[in-house]
Image (cartoon, grey):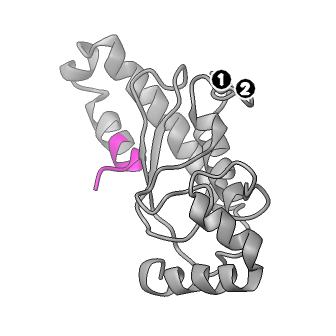
Amino acid sequence: MLTPASILKHDNGLKGSRTAATASDSTWRVSVRDKLLVKEVAELEANLPYEGYYQGGKFQFETEVPDAYNMVPPKVKCLTKFWHPNITERGEICLSLLREHSIDSPGWAPTRTIKDVVWGLHSLFTDLLNFDDPLNIEAAEHHLRDKEDFRNKADDYIKPYAR
């Protein structure tokens, strides 16, 4: 698997070679982007709390960081199937900061970072559960009808899919 850390190791190995000297500006920008990502991920790993309906679950997200990052937001998809009002079972995510242009809030801005995205995703698991404007309407209605049964169904998804 290609990770920001492995890309940095590869880039550092090329620094002394002619290949690095002839690299295009876009390659240089990617290298700077990757260095930023490695730093942001390290900070996140040290600070994420665990609580809420989804406590104990391990959720995987696919993040595509475009070459134009941080002028445009990363594309994020949830790979773990689970019961959530703001994330569909197909992995679509309703989080305004992942949109370039958002009606209800500022959306993405060049000052945002991957750390903001991860904190936003984390908030969807704790304090930003949005039952008033859900992407998964069925899950939101379930929560409004019976909170305890919603918790049980969330647990039923975590057991087979998020362990």
Frontmost residue, 153 versus 40:
153
| Alpha carbon separation for disc pair 2 and 1 | 8 Å
Q: Is residue 158 above or below residue 135?
A: below
Tell me if residue 144 comes above or below residue 10 in the rendering. Answer: below
| Numbered mark located on residue 109 in the image | 1
Q: Are marks 2 and 1 in contact (CB under 8 Å)?
A: yes
Helix, strand or loop at mark 2: loop
The x, y position of residue 136, in whole percent, is 56, 57
Magenta residue check for 150 = no
The residue indicated by pointer 2 is 106
Regarding residue 51, the answer to whether it shows in the image is no
Judge whether 77 appears above or below 19 on screen.
below
Which label belongs to residue 127? Answer: none
Task: Please give the name of the residue rendered at 60% of the width and 58% of the height, measured from the top-left corner.
Answer: 137
Residue at 53% x, 30% y: name it: 73
Badge 1 amino acid: Ala
